[in-house]
Image (spheres, rainbow, N blue to C red):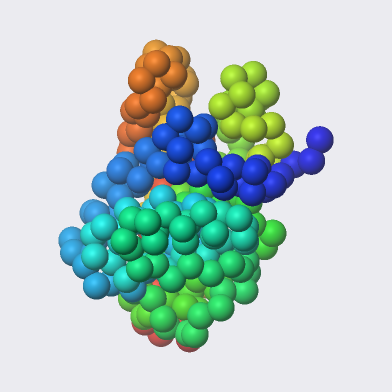
Amino acid sequence: MKKNNLEFYDRSASQWWNADAKIYTLYHLNRPRFEFFDRYIAHWQDLRVLDVGCGGGFSCEFMAARGVKVAGIDQSEKCIAAATQHAYESGFEIDYRCGVAERLPYPDHTFDVVVCVDVLEHVEDVNQVIAEISRILKPNGLFFFDTINRNFKSRLVMIWLMENILGEIERGVHDWNKFITPAEATELLKQNGFDQVEIKGFDLFGEALRFNLASYFKYKKTGTLEIVINEDTSINYIGKAVKMPCNR
């Protein structure tokens, strides 16, 4: 079976904004993600922000509604087409482009903020991606991200349970070997000109330590995810880093 199979996103593009589709679960991650991001940005209006791996545009439209000058990039042409169409229908002006994170088609020091969520565990060269994000950020710019830790627990929950048993994630979407430990992420960030790195747990069902089945069954019944930002980075984690002024 092919691992890190990103064809899933192409197949899901036409259903991206369908509230009854499985892919729409990702929409509900915006609120807790931005509750964390808002700790570092009080006013988003008029900031220039890039969403790397934007998919069909959930985070882009969330930011556009706040008055952000948003750009989004994704390697899936079908996702970009879906995002562009939905932004037009919603009255948002968002600069969408098709491309890969290792070669971002923007000049140096273009953006105030870069957001990269549910992406770093899928890219071909995570070091090159972080280097490119550093390049296009302005000095003192903020980088926000989330991704998946690499350990036995993440293999058990994200691969064996969520993909193979429960089917909440399509089989083959993830490759456990591409998951990134918080220590690895921190080191890559520092190597590429970032400091003030802060990483927190991003618990999709509230209790990563014991995988809260009650929360999972509530999600299945209501579609509501009880996401908690805490100190448990054992499965999913979220973070921020600041580009040092002296970099590039």
Q: Pinpoint residue 197: horizontal percent, then vertical percent.
A: 39, 60
At a point 40% along the width and 16% down the height, the residue shown is 221
Eyeballing the image, is 3 above or below 191? above
Residue drawn at 23 percent across, 59 percent down: 66
Q: Nearer the viewer, residue 123 or 199?
A: 123
State the residue at coordinates (36%, 20%).
Answer: 222
Q: Is residue 190 visible?
A: no
Circle count: 0
Q: Is residue 223 above or below residue 28?
A: above
* Residue 93 vs residue 3, the one in the foreground: 93
Towards the viewer: 5 or 211: 5
Residue 74 seen anywhere in this rendered image of the structure: yes
Residue sitting farthest toward the left? 42
- Image spot of residue 242 (x, y percent): 37, 68
* Residue drawn at x 64%, y 32% as measured from the top left: 170
Q: Is residue 150 left or right of residue 198?
A: right
Q: Please identify the quarter of the rendering in which residue 126 is found.
A: bottom right
When the figure is inspected, residue 166 is found, relative to residue 226, above or below; the finding is: above
Q: Residue furthest front?
A: 89
- For the N terminus, the image quarter is top right
Image coordinates of residue 166 in percent, x first then y, are 59, 19
Q: Toward which corner of the image does residue 93 lie, by quadrant?
A: bottom left
Instruction: Residue 202: give x, y in percent of width and height.
Output: 40, 39
